[in-house]
Image (cartoon, grey):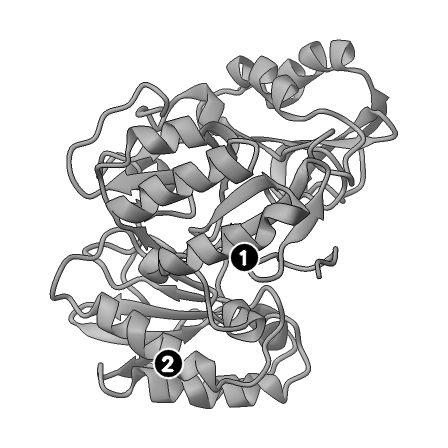
């Protein structure tokens, strides 16, 4: 049985305008070559060949039919990409830095955290974890409620919304996470930052700040990432990389573990298409009243370096929940223009057509 209105999973898919949407959460935010090939085949055979790279280092299969769902889930289980039950799947919302290396303890933390979450209290649908223990800080701007980070040579456990975290040894990280989860379950809040903003304090000492993170534009130049504009990939693009292990990221990009080349992916982090976020839009999403991505491609050349444009099919803003310098939000077949706000923010201008937007956009995004 499928329902609409929550964060989807592979066991609890969500109906969309183009069929069922299944969100796959790879262990450790990593796909081995067999999983890459298997997902490409599933998408080609049982979906519509479209895949989304999510902002939490996940991958979404699109266009799966109801009758094909049991076989898709069977194949995902064979690939070790399916959880034991929907509750376990929903709790295992773990994002892992792409900058880990063998022997640094990151994958050990992933396995231990997955074990603890099997018996954790029920958590809100968007509650998540970031394991940011690689060679450089990378996930501080990504959505997560509990963060495992580095402060020099030490591990740091930090609640989202707090500037400082608790220094903790590797053997105590997950037990301290269990303490924080028990506290949070009693807080009555949906996200950790909301609890912190309400002046509730989790049972963590405030020992140190995490290592400083590079600006994203610089961070994305430190490794050979492959980018999918708007996070929209295809089964063919994924199949191009089937000989490689891939690390998923929150930046609509993958990081191959060895040298990989494919014309289906962007390689320049300064490409104008990467300055725009855009959801599926109509007709792929039933909530949208406008097509999003064709307009986003048309407008990308007008977005200066260092700026960001968000084109959203509706006020939910799934592709970019945060504020953007300029957001275009679909409403009743036209667009509202919002300055320095999210898709559901207060419009500066309403009822714009596609042909009216280009000149307006250049004025509002100009240097």
Q: Mark 2 points at which residue?
A: 115
**In this picture, is 56 found above or below 164?**
above
Instruction: From the top left corner, tell me how far across and down residue 125 is, in percent.
Output: 62, 67
Q: Which residue is nearer to you in this view: 23 or 29?
A: 23
Q: Mark 1 points at which residue?
A: 10
Secondary element at tag 1? loop
Q: Which residue is nearer to you in this view: 52 or 144?
A: 52
User: Crowdedness of circle 1 by 10 Å Cα count: few (<14), some, many (20+)?
Assistant: many
Image quadrant holding the N terminus, namely: bottom right
Residue 20 left/right relative to 171: right
**In this picture, is 135 found above or below 331?**
below
Secondary element at tag 2? helix
Seen at 34% across and 32% down, the residue is 239
Instruction: From the top left corner, tell me how far across and down residue 243 is, in percent.
Output: 22, 37
**In this picture, is 83 found above or below 182?**
above
Q: In which quarter of the image is residue 115?
A: bottom left
Seen at 45% across and 81% down, the residue is 118
Visible in this render: residue 321? no
Residue 353 left/right relative to 134: right
């Amino acid at each position: 049985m499928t329902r609409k209105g929550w964060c989807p999973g592979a066991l609890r898919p969500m109906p969309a305008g183009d069929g069922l949407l299944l969100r796959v959460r790879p262990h450790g935010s990593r796909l081995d070559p067999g999983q890459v090939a298997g997902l490409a085949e599933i998408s080609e055979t049982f979906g519509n060949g479209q895949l989304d790279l999510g902002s939490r280092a996940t991958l979404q299969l699109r266009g799966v039919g109801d009758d094909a769902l049991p076989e898709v889930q069977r194949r995902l289980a064979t690939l070790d990409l399916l959880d034991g039950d929907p509750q376990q799947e929903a709790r295992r919302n773990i994002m892992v830095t792409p900058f880990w290396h063998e022997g640094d303890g990151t994958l050990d933390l992933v396995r231990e955290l997955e074990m603890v979450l099997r018996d954790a209290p029920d958590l809100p649908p968007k509650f998540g974890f970031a394991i940011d223990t690689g060679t450089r800080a990378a996930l501080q701007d990504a959505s997560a409620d509990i963060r495992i980070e580095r402060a020099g040579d030490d591990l740091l456990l930090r609640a989202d919304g707090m500037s400082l975290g608790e220094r903790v040894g590797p053997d105590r990280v997950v037990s301290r996470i269990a303490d924080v989860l028990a506290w949070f379950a009693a807080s009555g809040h949906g996200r950790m930052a909301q609890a912190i903003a309400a002046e509730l304090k989790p049972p963590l000492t405030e020992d140190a700040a995490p290592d400083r993170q590079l600006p994203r534009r610089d961070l994305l130049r430190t490794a050979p990432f492959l980018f999918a504009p708007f996070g929209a990939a295809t089964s063919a693009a994924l199949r191009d990389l089937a000989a490689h292990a891939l690390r998923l990221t929150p930046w609509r990009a993958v990081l191959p573990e060895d040298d990989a080349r494919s014309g289906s992916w962007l390689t320049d982090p300064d490409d104008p298409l990467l300055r725009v976020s855009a959801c599926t839009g109509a007709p792929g999403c039933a909530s949208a009243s406008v097509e999003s991505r064709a307009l986003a491609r048309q407008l990308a050349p007008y977005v200066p370096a260092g700026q960001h444009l968000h084109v959203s099919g509706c006020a939910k803003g799934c592709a970019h929940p945060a504020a953007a310098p300029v957001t275009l939000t679909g409403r009743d077949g036209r667009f509202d223009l919002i300055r320095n706000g999210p898709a559901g923010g207060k419009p500066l201008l309403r009822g714009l057509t596609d042909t009216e937007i280009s000149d307006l956009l250049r004025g509002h995004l100009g240097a």
